[in-house]
Amino acid sequence: MTTTEELLRGAAELFPDEVVTQAYVRHLDLPQGAGRFALITLDNGLDHTKPTTFGPASLANLNAALDQVEKEATEGEIVGVGVTGKPFIFAVGADLKGVELLKRHEDALAIGKGGHDVFRRLADLAVPTFAYYNGAAMGGGVEVGLHCSYRTVSAALPAFSLPEVFLGLVPGWGGCTLLPNLIGADRAVTVIIENSLNQNRQLKGKQVYELGIADAIFEGADFLEQSLIWTASVLSGQTEVVRPDVDRGEAWDAAVERGRAIADSKVHEAAPAAYRALDIIAAAKNGDLGQGFDSEDGALADLIMGGELRSGIYAFNLVQKRAKRPAGAPDKSLARPVSKVGVVGAGLMASQLALLFARRLEVPVVLTDIDQERVDKGVGYVHGEIDKLLLKGRLNQDKANRLKAAVTGSLDKAAAFSDADFVIEAVFEEMGVKQQVFAEVEAVVPEHAILATNTSSLSVSEMAAKLQHPERVVGFHFFNPVAILPLLEIVRGEKTDDASLATAFGVAKKLKKTAVLVKDAPAFVVNRILTRFMGEIQNVIDEGTPVDVAERAVEPLGLPMSPLVLLELVGPAIGLHVSETLHRAFPDRFTVSENLRRVVEAGKRGFYVHDSGKPELDPEVAALLEQGDSVLTEEQVRTRVLDVVAQEIGLMLDEGVVAEAQDIDLCLITGAGWPFHLGGITPYLDREGVSERVVGRRFLAPGVASVPA
């Protein structure tokens, strides 16, 4: 029979670039005379920005450390074993760089079994075991702690999660089985399914404790010291850990059903990971851990060999790596300092921008508009949002006061902007209006000031054409809601110089936005693709396909919302305006729906009413629609939609709108909520054969975000 060590050493050959985590054992005498204790520290030898992970060699090192402490425990030399991490990091799970290299199901199965075989030894030792979550813990890092007898958590812990479903996996080293048996199925569903499918929402230390995952919580400054004192009290019997009984009745089944409803609403059965995880949670109700671990192994191996994981890892690498090094960005040394920001406009978008600039840059921000009432309303909005942050405990009183003082309004552009370094306009989306605004601003700002436009579809070059210094105009396109969506499309006009562009990227970084450089082309990236996508949905409806059929046709994509619900969020009038802009630029491909125009002219906010809690076609909208007699099936609709999207992406790449297909995916993921399990859009089009059928080539290199051959 193959031993765990042989299994792991064999698997290690498949992970040639693994950053190996060591498992250092040191001994100490616990306080209060509680006895001799073995503490295992997980450390990859790198600084705290390089998280500790578990590849096969790392698991083998932990296994060897457990060999040592197992012997000591059996011989009575120690009274307990603890596991902790290097400063700021506990451990963040499996080595995904290696996982995506696996080509055979049996190799993937070995990774699952290897993790289980090592981690479960912590539960089988002859002495109690303790996990000390001192820093970031994710995936396998969380799971190694779940195998321990007791857990403590640092109040300063910034991020704790089981993100596997988000990436296309299941928590496969005990998470799906142990967590519901520890804290109950409903709370486990929140951590494993709900948080994962909400853009990998993280827990803080206090939440980990309140959920019952940790038995005690201590401040970060002396976390380990306090944890060891607590450990001594547990081992000496002074502290008794009491956990509430887990409800294994109807509440367990209801929690699983809640999880399925969440998965249905997020991925519409288009991605298997969430459902596989829920199946394991459902089966874990009987408390049979061995059966649960076997199910985790099987699910893990199946999903590792599937396309969802590879797309998830591809998407993860985009937002974690490519986003930090934007393609085409000038040398950051060219960026100019920004010590004051001006915002032209005081509407909702402008006010959101003012709040963001004030919070992230911590510099004075001044809004202007055409009358005092609008200015006061905009400043009032910002101050109101700051008050909300204060009430939620996100700001202290001093910080709130300073932010309010920093955001002011004025009707006098000359006085407001004479010392501004960066001025952004967020006024009506009409070229003449924006040109007039920039002419007025250019006349009063310093020569070094950057002029930015938040336009969603108009030409930045045309906007700057009549200025004396068009080289300092840059597109700075945010996505709504500004505080939530990470994407910032930075647009280089025909005459934008490197210093202005570098300053824009520098500001974007301070704003904590994902900046992508795009060419000055109509609607840039996200709006161009979404308009073509939604335009084709509208086309098939106009031609005669029922609205519900057209909407259901794209459910297999697992998009966060249906096309017409998205239109409602954007606003039909804005959707119509963007489609008209793109129709003028590309009349052969972009249509303007007369039905959509009727909806806008009727003052309707969308196609649906929500009286019953779910979207239903508004009877008044239904009465407005004039349709043909061409009725398509869902599959036919889906084919048409995907074909036009693939065509548009191919044209955008040919035009050099972005550097590579990866930038299109990054834009859609961070600006439009395109699912991680698709990897954006281009991996999906490649996997489904659409890109080769439509444009004659794959968008990504072979093997990127695709199922292994």
Image (cartoon, helix red, strand yellow):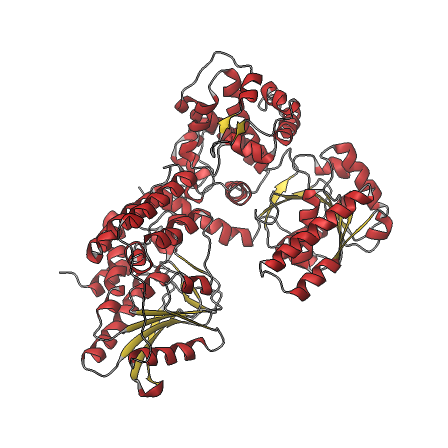
Residue 28 position within the rendered picture, expressed as x and y whole percent measured from the top left: 34, 84
Image coordinates of residue 680 in percent, x first then y, are 47, 41
Work out which quarter of the rendered image holds the C terminus and state it: top left
User: Looking at the image, which is closer to me, 118 or 382?
Assistant: 382
Q: Give the quadrant of residue 112.
A: bottom left
Q: Is residue 574 visible?
A: yes
Residue at horizontal 16 percent and vertical 61 percent from the top: 2
Quarter containing the N terminus = bottom left
| x 49%, y 40%: residue | 674
Picture layout, residue 67 above or below residue 566: below
Q: Is residue 502 visible?
A: no
Q: Nearer the viewer, residue 276 or 647?
A: 276
Specify the farthest residue to the bottom.
Answer: 33
Left or right placement of residue 650 versus residue 708 in this view: right
Name the residue at the left extreme: 1
In the picture, residue 23 is in which quadrant? bottom left
Q: Is residue 286 left or right of residue 513?
A: left
Q: Position of residue 416 (x, y in %)?
A: 83, 52
Give the vertical position of 33 relative to 499 (above or below).
below
Total numbered labels: 0
Based on the displayed image, in which of its 4 quarters is residue 580 positioned? Answer: top right
